[in-house]
Amino acid sequence: MYIDIVPNRGSPPAILLREGWRQGGKIHKRTVANLSGWPSQQIDALRLLLKGEPMVSARQAFRVHRSLPHGHVEAILQAMDHLGVDRLIASRPSRQRSLVMGMIVQRLIDPASKLACTRSWRNTTLAQELQIHDAHVDELYQALDWLFARQQRIEKKLAARHLSEGCLALYDVTSSYYEGRCCTLARRGHNRDGKKNTLSIVYGLLTDSQGRPVSVQVYPGNTGDPTTVPDQVDKLRGSFGLGRVVLVGDRGMLTQTRIEQLRAYPQLGWISALRSPAIARLMAAGAIDRSLFDKQDIAEITSADFPGERLVVCFNPLLAEDRRRTRDELLEATDKQLERIAAAVARRKQKPLSKDEIGLKAGKVVNRYKMAKHFTLTIEDGRFEWRRKDASIAAEAALDGFYVVRTSEAAQDIARDDVVRSYKLLGQVEQGFRTLKGLDIRVRPIFHRVEDRVRAHIFLCMLAYYVEWHLRRAWSPLLFDDETLAQDRRQRDPVRPAEASASAQCKKYARQTAEGLEVQSFPTLLANLGTRCRNTCSVRGLADGQEVGPGESTFDCLTEPTALQAKALALVDMLPVGAQ
């Protein structure tokens, strides 16, 4: 008996079980059964049985002992190998280097405490790949101490890769809340996380012009942003050995006082912006002529108040409308709350509210919406009145849509439009902070008690962001990210709001790539890669359908990659060596 496949014109072929025999020099055959409706697996099994091969169930012949997620570990380690992260950390292999590598990978896969790391990376192939399956939590803390001791050398290597003479360096500061009270770095200061009654830790991130992290420095939580600038200047000029560099910082960072200090370094340029009071003074002095912006949105001016500087004035009508609408909404909300206070004061006849009680209530209202500057309050015992300051509101409205970028750089070194574009590059540092604080890396909450380990923890998170920064760009065809953003930044209108490229808009609406793959976010792509497993299997020896011998030899078998996984791994393999 045999299985025969008979073509059936435009229909699927017929699959028949037939019996054949020879009689009188001729071959005869007859159809025993029509197997066209059978699944292919059953047909293959019957074909083997007809050939006389022993048949056993898959469970009897083949066993999967364990499956460990592998694809995301494979992709990250492959990227780190291309980027030379191991050589950045230490030139020679060591146990400490392997543990640090493991913590970086774990930070991207599933951020967790150091104790949880020793548990979690045994649930993937990470422990096998780096041979750290026997690591315990004390070793991880010791590896953090080892990493902190090497931070300066690692940052020098990163600076040598990504910073050069005359380049732009972006710098900004943020803070993260701290759980507990034991660390000396944890202080009460400006909490950017919105966590009330918690201590904070401040840290500044230095990147290249593309937002690629180069250095991070940690400060006590009550440190003011401008006071961190001298450390960055010393690092750029001293540790990194750069004589000529342009530092880009926001107006809260590069204040007038700090700029005066930077003038002591003639080769150190800077780009920042003016605060609103300074812009108002320029308008009052006639340095900014509003009529200039009837037909253009950008103009370069000079002022005696800012000697040796170039001032680039920009006007964005969309920003002006947004600020006007926001201010009107806040004024109206403040009016409503003040009316309630006035009504409550009027109702209290027998025991009028005191001046202090009314002032406390009114102060909370005007400070809640930051509108105190636009209201005049009259407060006495049992009496409360208010009115808007129309002159103050009109003066602020005159500034709507205007901002001024300032720089020490000459026109021949950097064009007017590029001054504004360079300042807007600070948005990439903000993106870095969002990634560090978000679900990708989760730098917070911080639990470490020892000051140096807090610094090492934040530096470890920066290294994880360094890897993610490159992975996002390698995977941009598969992500919702704009693939042409880096090129567009160099040539788009410096004032008008940025617009997504045609390819990014297409991915957003179609949710598919040009190859028909589903567009992913960075976390979902990592999760998808994690479904590619390394399976530990065994095959049992068979003889005449029976098991022989008690032992089983095991082997590893990788899950075949899907089209999406194969594309992601291929894109990682295209990363340039050393990420230059």
Image (tube, rainbow, N blue to C red):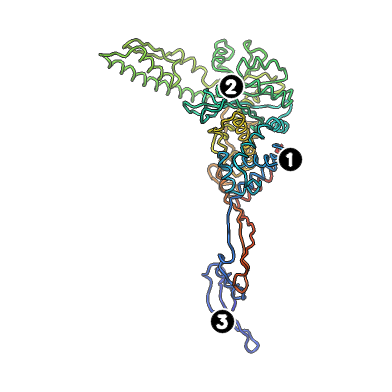
Say few, some or many: other residues with alpha carbon within 10 Å of mark 1 (under 14 / 14 to 19 / 20 or more): few
Label 1 – label 3 distance at C-alpha: 73 Å
The amino acid at mark 1 is Arg
Is residue 533 found left or right of 329 in the rendered image? right
Which residue is at a point 56% across and 15% down the rendered structure image? Answer: 279
Alpha-carbon distance for marks 3 and 2?
90 Å
User: Residue 532 location in percent, x, y?
Assistant: 59, 52
Q: Is residue 14 above or below residue 430?
A: below
Check disc 3 and give the amino acid type.
Answer: Arg
Label located before the other in sequence (1 or 3): 3
Q: Secondary structure at mark 1?
A: loop
Residue sitting farthest toward the bottom: 24
**What is the spatial separation of the Cα atoms under label 1 and label 2, in whole angstroms?**
38 Å
Q: Which residue is more in the foreground, 287 or 547? A: 547
Q: Is residue 243 left or right of residue 465?
A: right
Q: Is residue 318 visible to the viewer in this orientation of the structure?
A: no
Q: Amino acid at mark 2?
A: Asp
Which x, y percent locates residue 485? 62, 35
Residue 314 lies in what quarter of the image? top right
- Residue closer to the observer: 282 or 171: 171
In terms of depth relative to the viewer, which is nearer, 416 or 529? Answer: 529
The tag earlier along the polypeptide, 1 or 2, is: 1
Q: Which residue is mark 2?
A: 225
Earlier residue among tags 3 and 2? 3
- Mark 1 = which residue? 92
Packing grade of label 2 (10 A; few <14, some 14-19, many >=20) is some
* CB contact under 8 Å: marks 3 and 2: no
User: Which residue is disc 3 drawn over?
Assistant: 30
Give the vertical position of 305 relative to 113 (above or below): above
Query: How many other residues sit within 10 Å of disc 3, few (<14), some (14-19) or many (≥20)?
Result: few
Q: Secondary structure at mark 3?
A: strand
